[in-house]
Amino acid sequence: KWEEEAVGSYHAECVSSNLHTRILLEENLIKKKLAILQQESKEIHADWAIIHQRLVELNLSGKDEQEKTSKLETQEHQVSETARELGLDTAEEESILQNELPRQEAPAEHHPQHPPSSSDESSSDES
């Protein structure tokens, strides 16, 4: 009977030792996985901080662009209101400009091309 108890006790110690070894191995694996996950978490937080900063910059840039657009729209509205108040729409303004430009150029072109006067013709006939 004593031998049975000794064998049983030895067997129990082996099982206990095996379990203890397996538990230590599992604990080490879990610690390694935890370290990897903690490192990944730090990297993700760093990436998030960069993304957040970029979004803030883009948001500010977008607000600047909106302000510029709004100012330009306001100026455009003021110009069109002024033109309307003067009673000139865009088509009339363009028509006036097109009609004035050729008139200004035409006299300059016609000056050197005067037809010969009758006195010039008679002098050529006399010779």
Image (cartoon, grey):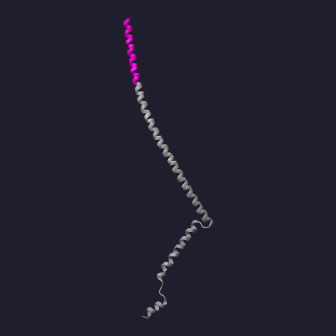
The mark tally for this picture is 0
Residue 119 location (% of width, % of height): 48, 91
**Position of residue 66 measured from the top left corner of the image (x, y, whole percent):** 54, 53
Where's residue 64, x and y in %?
Answer: 53, 52
Residue beneath the point at 46% across and 90% down? 121
Looking at the picture, does residue 73 appear above or below residue 126? above
Q: 118 and 4: which one is in front?
A: 4
What is the x, y in percent for residue 116? 47, 87
Reply above or below: 43 against 102.
above
For residue 65, above or below residue 99: above
* Chain part drawn in magenta: 1-25
> Going 40% across and 23% down the picture, which residue do you hit?
24
Judge whether residue 4 is colored magenta: yes
Residue 23 quadrant: top left
| 55 on left or right of 20 | right
Quarter placement of the C terminus: bottom left
Q: Quadrant of residue 16?
A: top left
Can you tell which quarter of the image residue 6 is in? top left
Residue at 51% over, 78% down? 107
Vertical relation: 86 (above or below) 46: below
Query: What's the magenta bit mostly, secondary-structure-wise?
Result: helix
Q: Residue at x 52, y 49 (%)?
A: 60
Q: Quadrant of the N terminus?
A: top left
